[in-house]
């Protein structure tokens, strides 16, 4: 198989996720986040040849609304539609009418990706990362059967 599939994360995906999530190397606290996501959140992975190479997490921690707290694609697998596919699948699973996410102002890749999916800016939060505000994004799911874009055609 040369493409990928989006599926629910399994506890056995933990090691693969830790191996490609470079933040884990700098911040071991990331493992706690991943453990919690695998236990209690909606956690999806992009599976390529039986191995998770990207993951996304949906929680309901943002004023009671859906919040995509993570989308991370292994560096070697970027720009192949996995980030987009994860966000589409998470939005499809979101049970609230309002879906939020956030990213640093310096993260132009994520901002560009969110723009292609219809997310709109929804304010910013200072004092998290010094000099790099957290930009909040909003997606209106009211009346939408899905995120409003077709499931991407997966690369073959
Ligand atoms: C941001 C991130 C999730 C994007 O994932 P990805 O799988 O590479 O993105 P996709 O292939 O689905 O990209 C879809 C579209 O988003 C935009 N995009 C994605 N990466 C981009 C980049 N580096 N520069 C400009 N546009 C970009 C493009 O419009 C792209 O479409 P195209 O490839 O046809 O031009 C990925 O770079 C990543 O994991 N970064 C590290 C973790 C992170 O920053 N996560 C976000 C905060 S939680």
Image: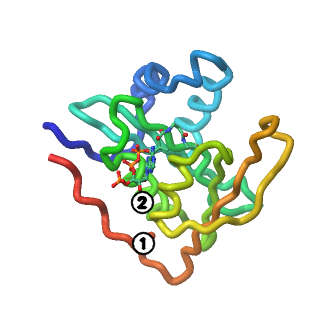
Camera-nearest residue between 7 and 108:
108
**Neighbourhood count class around disc 2 (C-alpha, 10 Å): few under 14, some 14–19, many 20 upward:** some
Q: Position of residue 99 (x, y in %)?
A: 61, 64
Question: Disc 2 vs disc 1: Cβ atoms closer than 8 Å?
Answer: yes
Distance of label 2 from label 1 (alpha carbons): 8 Å
Q: Measuring 27% from the left and 46% from the top, which residue is drawn there? A: 5
Q: Measuring 82% from the left and 35% from the top, which residue is drawn there? A: 130
Q: Measuring 21% from the left and 32% from the top, which residue is drawn there? A: 49
Task: Please give the residue where the numbered disc 2 appears in the rendered image.
Answer: 88
**Neighbourhood count class around disc 1 (C-alpha, 10 Å): few under 14, some 14–19, many 20 upward:** some
Q: Position of residue 75 (x, y in %)?
A: 41, 30
Task: Please give the residue where the numbered disc 1 appears in the rendered image.
Answer: 146
Is residue 137 depicted above or below 128 in this figure? Answer: below
Q: Is residue 101 left or right of residue 56?
A: right
* Residue, far bottom: 143
Q: Quadrant of the N terminus?
A: top left
């Amino acid at each position: 198989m040369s493409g990928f599939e989006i599926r629910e994360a399994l506890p056995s995906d933990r090691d693969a996720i830790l191996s490609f999530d470079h933040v884990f190397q700098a911040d071991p606290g990331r493992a706690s986040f991943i453990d919690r996501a695998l236990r209690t959140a909606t956690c999806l992975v992009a599976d390529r040849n039986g191995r998770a190479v990207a993951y996304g997490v949906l929680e309901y921690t943002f004023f009671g609304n859906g919040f995509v707290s993570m989308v991370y694609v292994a560096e070697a697998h970027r720009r192949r539609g996995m980030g987009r596919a994860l966000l589409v699948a998470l939005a499809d699973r979101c049970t609230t009418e309002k879906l939020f996410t956030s990213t640093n102002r310096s993260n132009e890749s994520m901002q560009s990706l969110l723009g292609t999916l219809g997310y709109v800016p929804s304010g910013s939060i200072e004092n998290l990362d010094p000099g790099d505000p957290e930009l909040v994004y909003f997606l209106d799911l009211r009346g939408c059967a899905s995120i409003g874009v077709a499931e991407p055609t997966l690369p073959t």
